[in-house]
Image (cartoon, grey):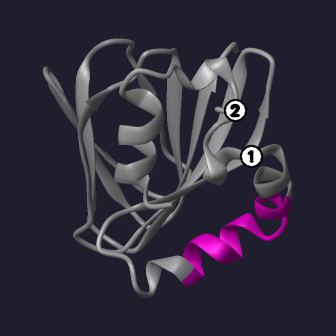
Amino acid sequence: MLFQDFVKHHIDGVTLLEGIVTDCPDCSTENIKMNKQMTIKKIKEELNSADSPVAKSLHHGTGFKVLMMGFKKGMILIEHKAHVKSKLTVLEGAVIYKEESRVVELGQYDEVEIPVEITQSVEAIEDSLCILSQGAS
């Protein structure tokens, strides 16, 4: 599932902390279990034919979720709002994190706290792999 589709499907009306949406075939427990294995490899493979960022759930539990996001250079995660406390960490590459009042360039191992209910976006300035952690800290 491409990240924009994931955002549209899960954030527009479904808080990520509510867990897995049982009527969604992409989010069934069985599908999530299969996707947990080799998550990063799957993201990188899907990026070869993707037009937008690719995201997959790496881990989730009560009150938190960890997503892996892959970007090809130039890909943009469209403007959206985080509905829960979040942090973006760059594992590979470099991205520009933008919100209403700031722009932050992030390189490998850099991180940024993402405020709740503030419009933000992410643009890859290199092929990149990021972790988005959401929820309880």
Label 2 environment density (alpha carbons within 10 Å; few <14, some 14–19, many ≥20): some
Name which residue lies at 42% across and 29% down.
11
* Magenta extent: 34-45
**Quarter residue 134 falls in:** top right
Q: Relative to 105, does residue 48 appear above or below in the rendering?
A: below
- Label whose residue precedes the other's in the sequence (1 or 2): 2
The kind of residue tagged 1 is: Ser
Nearest the camera: 53 or 87? 53
Q: Classify residue 76 by image quadrant.
A: bottom left
Residue at point 69%, 77% (across, down): 41
For label 1, the SS is: loop
Disc 1 designates what residue?
A: 28
- Left/right placement of residue 45 relative to residue 65 reads left
Q: Are marks 1 and 2 in contact (CB under 8 Å)?
A: yes
Q: Which residue is mark 2?
A: 20
Q: Residue at x 52, y 78 (%)?
A: 46
Residue at the (51%, 60%) spot, across then down: 1
43 magenta-colored: yes
59 in magenta: no
Up/down of 63 relative to 134, above or below? above
